[in-house]
Structure formats: C-alpha cells, structure tokens
Image (cartoon, rainbow, N blue to C red):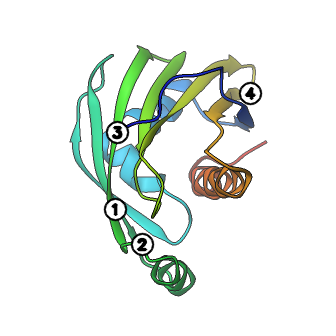
C-alpha cells in the first residue's frame, strides 16, 4: 500500500548549467542510450528495459551496484545489488520540462510511496540550465541520501556534458 496523500511534501532542488545544445541534454534524459550513459549514482550501472516517453508512459530500468563501496553498502543495508525501478512520466514538454514519479519501494521496513521529480530545461546563451526539483523522502536520513544520490548521478552527467 502506498502512502496516503497529505500536505505538500518538502522538496529540494539542484541546478546545473551545461555548455551543450538543448537537444543533446534533452536526449540524455529521454532516450535509452542517453539514460544508460549516466543515470544512477556513481558506482551503479543502469540498463533500460523499456521506455515510453509520454505522460502516463513509463521508463523501466535495472540499477546494479558495481563499485566495491556501493556493493558493501547495499549488502550492509540488506538491499539487493540490483533493483528494478519504474518511472511514470507525468509531463513531457520537449526541450522544456520533464516530470515523473518514481515508486520508492527499495527501503527495508518502509511502505512504498511515490517521489515526484521535475526537470526544467532552459536554453541559455552558452548552453542549457537545468533545475531539478525532487520530493523529500520519508525522513531526513533518506532525504540526505536522495540528495547525495542525485548529486552523484549529476556528476556523471557533468562528465558527459561539461559544466560552466
């Protein structure tokens, strides 16, 4: 059973600016090859199993811990090394906005619940500015982990695109 909707959840935001064409940045967020090239925190690999990029469509993927420190953390936390995840797109406005919900169902002892993410793509004179807004998790520890995971994941995107 998923958590009931209550008052608006807290959120956190992360911003990046890339010296890259908006079409390239969009493709990295919305294509199988693009997503597999950077998605998931450092030390994890992602394999897309299906992608239906439209409101109501889904991205399904498997994320596997591959770096020794991530493998050790997952084992210590009683979590599987490979997790299957599903993203449900709620908004797809090409080159402008991507929004989706992810089911947080990977935490031992915690009932699954939805986490909303929105990504704003803004063309700038030198490239693209991204603003990623993510729902807070169920507690401060997991929210800090979510922020760290998103920052780690974006470092992989930074390496592909170069920040400025």
- The residue at 43%/48% (across/down) is 111
Residue highlighted by disc 2? 79
Tell whether 57 sits left or right of 94. left
Image coordinates of residue 116 in percent, x first then y, are 52, 30
Residue 80 to residue 54: above or below: below
Query: Disc 1 marks which residue?
Result: 83
Position above or below: 134 against 44: above
The one nearer the camera, 117 or 40, is 117
Q: Position of residue 35 (x, y in %)?
A: 40, 46
Label 3 element class: loop
Disc 3 and disc 2: Cα gap in Å? 20 Å
- Please tell me whether mark 3 or mark 2 is closer to you in this view: 3
Distance between mark 1 and mark 4 Cα atoms: 37 Å
Query: Are the residues tagged 2 and 1 within 8 Å (C-beta)?
Result: yes
* Residue 143, above or below 97: below
The mark closer to the camera, 3 or 4, is 3
Marks 2 and 4 in Cβ contact (< 8 Å)? no
Q: Residue at x 29, y 19 (%)?
A: 56
Q: Secondary structure at mark 2?
A: loop
Residue 126, label in figure: 4
**Dot 4: within a 10 Å radius of its alpha carbon, few (fewer than 14), some, or many (20 or more) residues?**
few
**Crowdedness near tag 3: few (<14), some (14–19) or many (≥20) residues, C-alpha within 10 Å:** few
Q: Earlier in the sequence, mark 2 or mark 4?
A: 2
Give the spatial CA distance, label 2 vs label 1.
Answer: 9 Å
Q: Nearer the viewer, residue 151 or 11?
A: 11
**SS for tag 1?**
strand
Earlier sequence position, callout 1 versus callout 3: 3
What secondary structure is marked by label 4?
Answer: loop
Q: Quadrant of the C terminus?
A: top right
Find the distance from the CA under tag 3 to the CA under tag 4: 46 Å
Q: Dot 1 surroundings within 10 Å: few (below 14), some, or many (20 or more)?
A: some
Kindly report which numbered mark, 1 or 3, lies closer to the viewer in this rendering: 3
């Amino acid at each position: 059973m998923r958590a009931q909707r209550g008052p608006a959840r807290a959120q956190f935001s992360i911003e990046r600016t890339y010296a890259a064409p908006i079409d390239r940045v969009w493709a990295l967020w919305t294509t199988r090859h693009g997503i597999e090239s950077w998605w998931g925190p450092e030390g994890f690999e992602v394999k897309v199993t299906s992608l239906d990029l439209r409101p109501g469509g889904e991205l399904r993927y498997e994320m596997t811990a591959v770096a020794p420190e991530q493998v050790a953390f997952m084992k210590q936390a009683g979590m599987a090394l490979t997790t299957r995840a599903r993203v449900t797109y709620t908004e797809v406005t090409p080159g402008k906005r991507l929004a989706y919900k992810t089911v947080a169902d990977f935490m031992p002892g915690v009932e699954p619940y939805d986490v909303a993410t929105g990504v704003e793509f803004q063309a700038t004179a030198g490239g693209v500015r991204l603003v990623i807004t993510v729902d807070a998790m169920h507690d401060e520890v997991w929210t800090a982990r979510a922020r760290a995971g998103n920052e780690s994941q974006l470092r992989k995107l930074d390496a592909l695109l170069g920040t400025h």
